[in-house]
Image: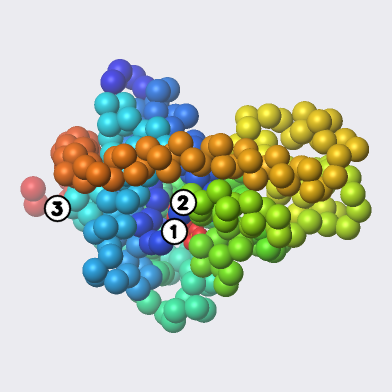
Amino acid sequence: MAVNKKIAVSGVRPSGELHLGNYLGAIKQFVELQKKYKTFFFIADLHAITEPQDPKNLSKQTLDIATLYLACGLKAKETVLFVQSHVPAHVELGWMLNTITPLGELERMTQFKEKSERQGLLAGLLNYPVQMAADILLYQAEIVPVGEDQVQHLELARTLARKFNTRFGNTFKEPQALLRKEGARVMGLDDPSKKMSKSAPSANNYIGVFDDPENIRRKIKIAVTDSGKEIVYDPTKKPGISNLLVIMSQISDTSVKELEAKYKNKSYGEFKNDLAEALVQKLSPIQKKYRELSKNPKKILTILKRGAEDANKIASQTLLEAKRKMGFLI
Ligand code: ATP
Ligand code: LTN
């Protein structure tokens, strides 16, 4: 990997079924970035435990995300792929950043407010974005590919980098969120006013990355559309069909404008049929590759261990520098 490449960092939590929003908002971007940037992509297990996880499943879910990363096209030779908890510097820097984070900044986070309503007030949930800042700053990342729901957390990472640099001397780069123009916020199929989410009350809200063709066709068929017949992009007046157009556009690498022209005078039914088939075409090869890779979990674990070693080299350097600046005895 060339030394002068810009650095990109991101992670996905191993906390349940992955859906099309995660794929389009995050993983598809990771795959596109790995050639142009020096990339560090990890499985955010430390973040997953901010919500209750069954200890029997956590390690399997972690391996599953790694397998999925590879099945989607991430290459162990081009990207540093690792498990967050395998690089202890994440937690160490997280703690140090906690000591300069104003409580008010954390209490106003949308995700904290929503999740704490569901599961009660836990310190880990509150401090989640500080840990996320540490994940990013350790690698001096310039860009962080994420979905729109993470932008507020990225702002905090920038604030903490600035705060630390001002108080202790220049140490961290200020990262920027990288959002897709379209697909950064895929909406729920059964309720296009809210983002697609695995925590939605019904599984008809999302297309799971592992959904079989029959399920995909069924979910698209019953996806909420809007009054009128035209297939046009208008998120305010036609949120349902606009969301489906964005999904189709991202899946088929065709612009929304081209799709509007193609489906002029066609019915919702015809469009939905084509969308379902496009999704089946896109997801089937990923699922097939995933099944192949799953047969050899040892190989995946080896990739992850090697990734952690590479990540650790960079992360421990940055951590040492931050400790030095803060005045620790080294
Ligand atoms: P959920 O609400 O389903 O639990 P999440 O944001 O907690 O989703 P993660 O696995 O933590 O899911 O997120 C992985 C990545 O997917 C993040 O970059 C996040 O921004 C992105 N993402 C999640 N939901 C969507 C969505 N509906 N549209 C676009 N990107 C999304
Ligand atoms: N909070 C993120 C996962 C995550 C992350 C990160 C993303 C943890 N640490 C650092 C980007 C950079 C989420 O996707 N829900």
Distance in Å between CA atoms under marks 3 and 2: 48 Å
Q: Is mark 2 within 8 Å of ligand 1?
A: no
User: Residue 288, position in %: x, y?
Assistant: 40, 40
Q: Quadrant of residue 316?
A: top left
Q: Quadrant of residue 203?
A: bottom right
Residue at label 1? 17
Tell me the element at label 1. loop
Identified by mark 1, the residue type is Glu
In this picture the colour scheme is rainbow
Residue at left offset 32%, top offset 66%: 49
Does residue 311 appear in this view?
yes
Tell me the element at label 2. loop
Distance in Å between CA atoms under marks 1 and 3: 42 Å
User: Residue 167, position in %: x, y?
Assistant: 34, 50
Residue at left offset 63%, top offset 41%: 277
Residue at label 3? 328
Does residue 180 appear in this view?
no
Q: Quadrant of residue 222?
A: bottom right
Residue at left offset 30%, top offset 18%: 2
